[in-house]
Amino acid sequence: MATPRSEPKQERARRTKNHILQSAAQLFAERGYATVTLQDVAERAEMTKGAVYFHYTNKEALAVAVVQEHYARWPEILKGAEGNHEEPFDTLTAVLDTVTRAFATDIVVQAGARLQIERALIDAELPEPYVGWEDYLTRLIAEARDAGQLRAGVEPRAAARVLVSAFFGMQHISDVLSRRKDLAERHEELRAVLLEGLRG
Ligand SMILES: CCC[C@@H]1OCC(CO)=C1C(=O)O
């Protein structure tokens, strides 16, 4: 990794730390937590193992950092997706479209999702997964209900739980069977069958 001589020390450290994190995310997403070693991360980052250790003392610390970065990205991604749609149901649709694009393109999101599944292998404190999505989608679906856009009899939290389960199952199966190459197509199916099935 090239380092400009004039770069301030703190900026150089931040950039190096991020480069290591991106390299680790690629490996965690490709191979899973168990098989990746710090030596693998050093090689992917084109750095020495010592330089990696300087920033992350062990593999658990790297996994925690990737998951934390995964969580940290969503408020901005979702704020952009919510935008200023007139109809709450349009907001819900736009959010799911945006989340799918993030899972299809963002290696930190892909690695974070896989580490959540493999959390039992990671000897570190990680946030409880999926519950934030359930609360967030419950709010959006309740707003659609209040605007008369939700099918009669649908309970927002139940619908949110079904959407979270369907989405994370979909993205996982797409990853396992096609490395997410068919994720957009599968998302269209989820939108047409499940999301439109909620519309009042
Ligand atoms: C609405 C954000 C929900 C939260 O942020 C990223 C993430 C990881 O999947 C979360 C979760 O699982 O609840």
Image: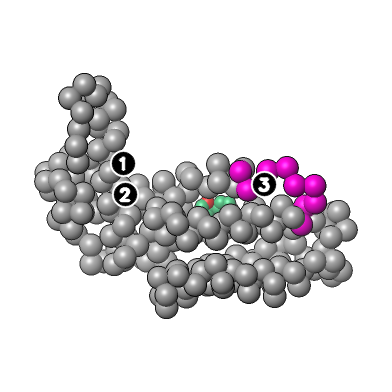
Task: Tell whether label 2 touches label 1 (CB within 8 Å).
Answer: yes
Q: Quadrant of the N terminus?
A: top left
Reply above or below: 109 against 197: above
Q: How far apart are the alpha carbons under marks 1 and 2? A: 6 Å
The residue that disc 2 covers is 22
- Residue 101 position, x and y percent, is 53, 58
- Camera-side residue of 34 and 16: 16
Q: Give the range drawn in magenta.
A: 80-89
Q: Quadrant of the C terminus?
A: bottom right
The image quarter containing residue 9 is top left
Is residue 31 in view from this perspective?
A: yes
The residue that disc 1 covers is 18
Looking at the rendered structure, the kind of residue marked 3 is Glu
Looking at the rendered structure, the kind of residue marked 1 is Asn
Identify the residue at horizontal 25%, vertical 38% (top origin). 16
Q: How far apart are the alpha carbons under marks 1 and 3? A: 28 Å
The residue that disc 3 covers is 82
- Residue 13 position, x and y percent, is 25, 32
Q: How far apart are the alpha carbons under marks 3 and 2? A: 27 Å
